[in-house]
Amino acid sequence: MQLGLIMVINLGIGLYTPPIGTTLFISASIAKCSLGETTRELWPFFLVGMLVLLAVSYIPALTSTDGNLGAGLSAVAVFGSLRS
């Protein structure tokens, strides 16, 4: 499951970053502005995407739960795996 999420997040980041960045070119043409303007406004979203990718990659407890948030998943359980 973790590998699948890492791949999906990576592909999402790749869609809006150059040189391929198809959604970057499409959004710039729809907004009728230059790629430079679009890229300047994209940086906060790029940084958040990279932080999410790093969190999913290096904190396995984020992806190894069964999806039931009421099952007792706590910050200790998530960040406790960082010490080992």
Image (spheres, grey):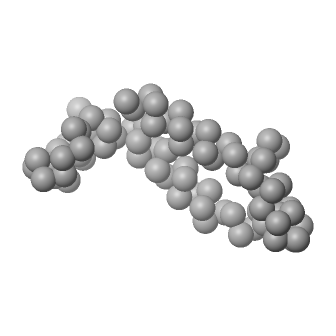
Left or right relative to 72: residue 2: right
Left or right relative to 63: residue 8: right
Is residue 36 at least partly visible in the picture? no
Residue 84: quadrant of the picture = top left
> Which residue is nearer to you in this view: 32 or 56?
32
Work out whether 7 lies above or below 70: above
Give the mark count.
0
Q: At x 24% / y 44%, what residue is drawn?
A: 67
Q: At x 58% / y 39%, what residue is drawn?
A: 10
Work out whether 4 lies above or below 79: above
Work out whether 60 lies above or below 25: above
Is residue 56 at least partly visible in the picture? yes
> Which residue is nearer to you in this view: 13 or 66?
66
Left or right relative to 25: residue 55: left
State the image coordinates of residue 28 (x, y, percent, origin top left). Answer: 83, 63
Pick the quarter of the image with the N terminus: top left
Please identify the residue farthest to the front as the structure is shown: 30
Q: At x 41% / y 42%, what residue is drawn?
A: 56
State the image coordinates of residue 18 (x, y, percent, origin top left). Answer: 79, 47
> Which residue is nearer to you in this view: 56 or 82?
56
Q: At x 69% / y 46%, what residue is drawn?
A: 15
